[in-house]
Image: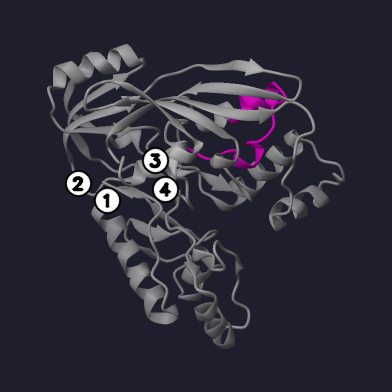
């Protein structure tokens, strides 16, 4: 393994923040990772995937390891389903495209989500009515403490809304090497109930969509709302959509009859964070090198040269503004380092 000292992470995070790691290394296999763990002798380790869900607010002490394990294979299959295995360093959207090429359904709604396969279960990524937990079989992870390999099944991952055990008690303790997904080969169960997908399909004159049609609709929707990180630094949706008690929602609805909402979990009501932010006047706001994207209030952007602290400062101002007006405290979806 080759270690790089005082290594710039600017090209490895989609916000384009110029933070440095005390030491940096990339690993493409479990054996390489285990070799690295021996060499580091217990020094602090941080795992980096695609850098699409991270905001660096300062330089990173210790050692940053980039997950670069590649490969996509079908491990087993029958007439109706296939078990697909993908390396943790595989680009997520490339996995979606690979599955579509092999006519495997289940993750077409998750098209164009940035990041890597290894990061997907940590966040329990989701979009347009589908989450990775819906097709998740298991994953293989390496303990950063002793290098042992552990299998995490569906129930052991404790998936929640943009949440999993890897963001809580197992945070920073495992390196996700391989993820296994159970996908359909026939009789695909399409999820087109989300309004934007339904409208896009109708606009394109598609009455009986395929998994390919759904994917193309999602790509079109996401491309129209979210800026390309290669042109404008961002990490996609910065905040989670809050879920509030029904009683609190009913009180808000009296004051704001047009409040956008969806059914949440356990009888709660989900209110889109983007709607709340826009109502507070932040959509399109810009101050220096940071701002709130003019096409989607949920996205904070780096117009060039911004520091992570400046982006985080804007996020805090938005959080305080929404809480003051609506009594709802937003929670960042992006990991703050």
Q: Look at the numbered discs 3 and 1 and tell me whether their residues touch, using CB distance below 8 Å.
A: no
Residue 307, visible in the rendered structure: no
Q: Secondary structure at mark 2?
A: loop
Residue 52: image quadrant is top left
* Residue in the picture at 63% in, 50% down: 129
Q: Residues within 10 Å of mark 2 (few under 14, many from 20)?
A: some
Residue 136: image quadrant is top right
Q: Earlier in the sequence, mark 4 or mark 2?
A: 2
Q: Earlier in the sequence, mark 3 or mark 1?
A: 3
In the drawing, does residue 103 fall left or right of residue 32? Answer: right
Residue 77: image quadrant is top right
Q: Residues within 10 Å of mark 1 (few under 14, many from 20)?
A: many
Pick out the residue farthest to the front: 155
* Residue in the picture at 40% in, 33% down: 50
Q: Which residue is mark 4?
A: 234
Distance Cα–Cα, label 4 vs label 2: 17 Å
240 versus 247 height, above or below: above
Distance Cα–Cα, label 3 vs label 1: 12 Å
Q: Secondary structure at mark 4?
A: strand
Q: Which residue is mark 2?
A: 58
Query: Which percent across, then down, holds residue 148?
Result: 29, 20
Q: Look at the numbered discs 2 and 1 and tell me whether their residues touch, using CB distance below 8 Å.
A: yes
Residue 74, visible in the rendered structure: yes
Circle on res. 14: 3
- Magenta stretch in the rendered image: 96-114
């Amino acid at each position: 393994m080759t270690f790089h000292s005082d290594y710039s992470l600017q090209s490895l995070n989609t916000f384009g923040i110029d933070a440095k790691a005390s030491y940096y290394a990339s690993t493409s296999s479990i054996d390489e990772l285990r070799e690295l763990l021996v060499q580091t002798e217990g020094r602090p380790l941080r795992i980096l995937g695609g850098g699409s869900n991270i905001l660096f607010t300062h330089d990173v002490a210790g050692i940053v390891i980039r997950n670069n394990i590649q490969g996509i294979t079908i491990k087993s299959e029958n007439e109706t389903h296939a078990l697909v295995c993908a390396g943790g360093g595989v680009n997520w959207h490339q996995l979606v495209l690979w599955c579509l090429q092999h006519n495997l359904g289940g993750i077409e709604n998750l098209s164009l989500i940035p990041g890597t396969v290894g990061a997907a279960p940590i966040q329990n990524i989701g979009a347009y009515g589908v989450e990775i937990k819906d097709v998740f079989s298991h994953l293989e992870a390496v303990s950063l403490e002793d290098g042992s390999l552990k299998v995490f099944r569906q129930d052991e991952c404790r998936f929640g809304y943009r949440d999993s055990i890897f963001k809580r008690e197992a945070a920073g303790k495992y390196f996700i090497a391989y993820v296994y997904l159970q996908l359909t080969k026939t009789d695909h169960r399409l999820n087109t109930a989300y309004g934007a997908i339904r409208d896009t399909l109708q606009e394109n004159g598609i009455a009986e969509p395929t998994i390919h049609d759904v994917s193309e609709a999602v790509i079109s929707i996401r491309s129209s709302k979210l800026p390309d990180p290669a042109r404008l630094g961002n990490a996609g949706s910065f905040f989670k959509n809050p879920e509030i008690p029904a009683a609190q929602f009913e009180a808000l609805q009296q004051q704001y009859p047009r409040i956008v909402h969806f059914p949440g979990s356990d009888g709660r009501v989900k209110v889109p964070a983007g709607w709340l932010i826009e109502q507070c006047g932040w959509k399109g706001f810009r101050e220096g090198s940071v701002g709130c994207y003019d096409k989607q209030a949920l996205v904070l952007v780096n117009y060039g040269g911004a520091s992570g602290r400046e982006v985080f400062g804007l996020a805090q101002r938005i959080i305080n503004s929404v809480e003051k007006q609506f009594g709802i405290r937003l929670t960042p979806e992006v990991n703050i380092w």
